Image (cartoon, rainbow, N blue to C red):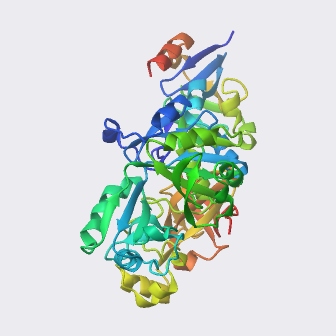
Amino acid sequence: MAETRYTKDHEYIRIEGETGTVGISDYAQGQLGDVVFVELPEIGKALSKGGEAAVVESVKAASEVYAPVSGEVVEVNSELEAAPGTVNEDPAGKGWFLKIKLKDAAELESLMSEAEYQDYVKSL
Amino acid sequence: MAEAADAKTADGKTADAAGTATLLKTPLHARHVALGARMVPFAGYDMPVQYPMGVLGEHNWTREKAGLFDVSHMGQCFLVGPDHETVARALEALIPADIVNLAPGKQRYSQLLNEDGGILDDLMVTRSADPDEDGALYLVVNAACKEADYAHIEARLPANVKLIKAEHRGLIALQGPGAEAALAKLAPEAAEMGFMTSRTVKVAGIKANVSRSGYTGEDGYEISAAANRIGEIWDTLLLDATVKPIGLGARDSLRLEAGLCLYGHDIDTTTSPIEAALNWSIQKRRREEGGFPGAARIQRELAEGPARLRVGLLPEGRAPAREGAEIATPEGEVVGTVTSGGFGPTLNGPCAMGYVARAHSAPGTKLNLIVRGKPLPAVVAPMPFVPNGYKR
């Protein structure tokens, strides 16, 4: 089963071999409220860990989505352009943002496991 | 994920970290919490930004049915003097609206002006319909400005006119196409009221001052009643299946689509009512006679046109432009700034307002809004963005 790891900024990355699928957590979508617009990066863009990867806008505010790890964007979820509300409905599934080809798998170790993230959210 | 640097809290103001320790509560605070609202600091009050329905759902509900808003944080006060003319003239020295000729039971929108014609606050002024209450004007001002407004007004009143704060009152707004039917069940007279009129009626048996006005672009009412009774009116209205509670998040998106100004954002001490395209709120007699703060500037701007003008802006595509975004010509010359912007749920797209140099203010003018460093094409558009539903 694919492993999912989380940042303190509420991005997740689901690891599938050399690539990871990046999105925002269920907690994050709940905090954000109704998503009305998603700006996705160009395919091929090199992202560095902690750098801006995408922008997600709710009715009330714009938020940046940061790259959980460094790597190259290999795919984006262009369905979100027409249906940004998918981020609210299914953040861990159809509401994914982008897929990244990992530059350095060791960077994953600095991220939280599912259990660690759930504890972190409870502490907020 | 983190809120972008230029993002604002739900109320549209930058968060006040220091102000959270001593937040005030409206008389309906416990009800918001019980309804599951997400509470945020706004103008010194702990206020509901959204209920479990969410901002989009609440916005759409208000446009289609009836939304109920707690606006008890706003400042309610009375100006009281010997007769209407004396009180009206005292207020006219501070605002550019014609209040002397305001008929009993009528309401007007105006602005408190500084000596430069800049806007200290915007407000609603109501003359009671009751002849026994003549010589009293009821004012509603913004929560964040109310203490400064009261001090400003009091310092400038003649000795025979007094300002009486109505801090013992709560204020709620019922807005949307279903507002008339919902309120008329509790106060049948409400159905007969015209837009921008006011009456004292019993709502669910409780004495209330009701005006047919609001801040959403929809038909609707504002209901002022004693703080210890307003909760009963709130509860009774919510028993109606067409009425749902609506938070500040949807209040902001509703007023933006309606093209209505938010004080501190779209208007402030640096903007005049003419720059803000609020000319309609300055009646002919006042334009000609002046006699209000900043009259020289305002009369000059009326005659010659202001240097800059508040306009509506419709971005192409789906990306919203937020407050603070620069407005540039297609050639790259910066000609203004966005003062409010976001996503309009009813419009089903982004909309914004901002100030541009007058040469670029005509509807249809193509401009770029600079969003995250990139030019976002937009067009100057008339407001409201969504047709209003006022009961004329």
Residue A20's quadrant in the figure? top right
Q: Residue furthest front?
A: B132
Residue name at image x 66 percent, y 32 percent: A88
Residue B353's quadrant in the figure? bottom right
Q: Is residue B285 above or below residue B256?
A: below
Q: Is residue A3 above or below residue B378?
A: above
Residue B234 seen in the current view = yes
Q: Is residue B55 above or below residue B265?
A: above
Residue name at image x 40 percent, y 76 percent: B88
Of residues B2 and B205, which is closer to you in this image? Answer: B205
The picture places residue A124, in percent across and down from the top left corner, at 44, 22
The picture places residue B189, in percent across and down from the top left corner, at 65, 59
The picture places residue B261, in percent across and down from the top left corner, at 51, 62
Of residues A94 and B122, which is closer to you in this image? Answer: B122
The picture places residue A15, in percent across and down from the top left corner, at 64, 17
Say left or right for A64 vs B175: left
Question: Could you tell me how many numbered marks the image carries?
Answer: 0
Residue A25 seen in the current view = no
Say left or right for A16 vs B132: right
Position of the C terminus of chain B, as image quadrant, is: bottom right
Residue name at image x 71 percent, y 43 percent: B242
Of residues A100 and B354, which is closer to you in this image? Answer: B354
Of residues A97 and B111, which is closer to you in this image? Answer: B111
